[in-house]
Image (cartoon, helix red, strand yellow):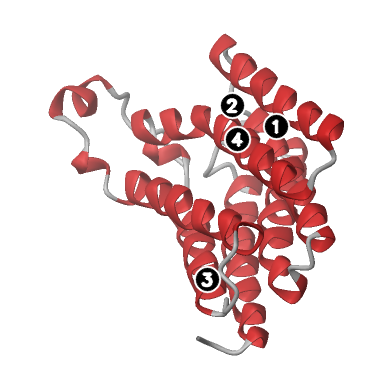
Amino acid sequence: MLPPNVVLLAAAFNIVGTSTYVIATLRGRTKPNRVTWLLWAVAPLIAFAAELGEGVGLRSITTFMVGFGPLLVFVASLVNRDSYWEISRFDKVCGAISVVALVLWGITRVGNVAISLSIVADLVAGIPTVAKAYRRPETEDHRAFLCAAISAGISLLTIADWRFATVAFPIYILVFAGLLAVLIRFPRLRPARVRASSPEPEPV
């Protein structure tokens, strides 16, 4: 087990990943789905508050950074209109389900339930970006997701008391962000028919 203060290193990875994505968004090289990134900000920040209530302590800074980073990306997408990604009906449905999960948390007000529902909300909100990363990987930047996965992995290595409140969100981020990083970084892993149907990358 690593010392608890190592979570500050995990937070640093999140800062690096967020910075690269924000810069790419401002320059129009990435096209974030605003529904996804806004809800990705809200859900982890709620989970962060719940973790504090459950006594998670310093390790909850990883969850905070997972929410704060997407908030910065969302703001960057508003600054640069060229980085806008058209919101489909599918995006809206996922966003609505995510919001319902957050509302249910507000009704229950139970720490572990809040964390569970925040994970559900975060996951559903991210489905449109997973689909976009699969079909149009050139519109995303794998570095932000890779840094988030590394950050979550470091956070897990500092945990001595493995209970739901301390490990649930880091494990989820490790798996989900890792999946996105692989989809974006290695687009040739997609079936040939998907690659053939994908449009050519736009010039940046």
At 53% from the left and 65% from the top, the residue drawn is 152
Question: Which of the 4 image quarters holds residue 202?
Answer: top left
Residue depth check, mark 2 versus mark 4: number of the one nearer the observer: 4
Which of the marked residues, 4 or 1, is nearer the chain's N terminus?
1
Task: Tell me if mark 2 has few (under 14), some (14-19) or many (20+) residues whose alpha carbon lies within 10 angstroms of its own.
Answer: some
Question: Which mark is in front, 1 or 2?
Answer: 2
Q: Nearer the viewer, residue 54 or 120?
A: 54
| Disc 1 crowd, CA 10 A, few/some/many (<14, 14-19, 20+) | few
> Which residue is disc 1 drawn over?
81
- Do the CB atoms of the residues marked 4 and 3 lie less than 8 Å apart? no
Q: Is residue 160 above or below residue 179?
A: below
Q: Amino acid at mark 3?
A: Leu
Which amino acid lies under the numbered mark 2 shown in the image of this protein?
Answer: Trp
Spatial CA distance of label 4 from label 1 is 29 Å
**Foreground label between 2 and 3:** 3
Decide: is 152 above or below 154. Answer: above
First in sequence: mark 2 vs mark 4: 2
* Element at label 1: helix
Q: Does residue 66 sit above or below 120 in this rendering? A: below
- Distance (Cα) linking label 1 and label 2: 9 Å
Q: Residue at x 75, y 75 (%)?
A: 58
Disc on res. 120: 4
Kind of residue at disc 1? Arg
The residue beneath circle 3 is 156
Q: Which mark is residue 55?
A: none
Seen from the viewer's position, the closer of residues 94 and 158 is: 158
Asked whether the beta carbons under mark 3 and mark 1 sit within 8 Å of each other, the answer is no
Secondary structure of the residue carrying tag 4 is helix
Residue drawn at (65%, 72%) of the image:
11
Q: Nearer the viewer, mark 3 or mark 1?
A: 3
Residue receiving disc 2:
85
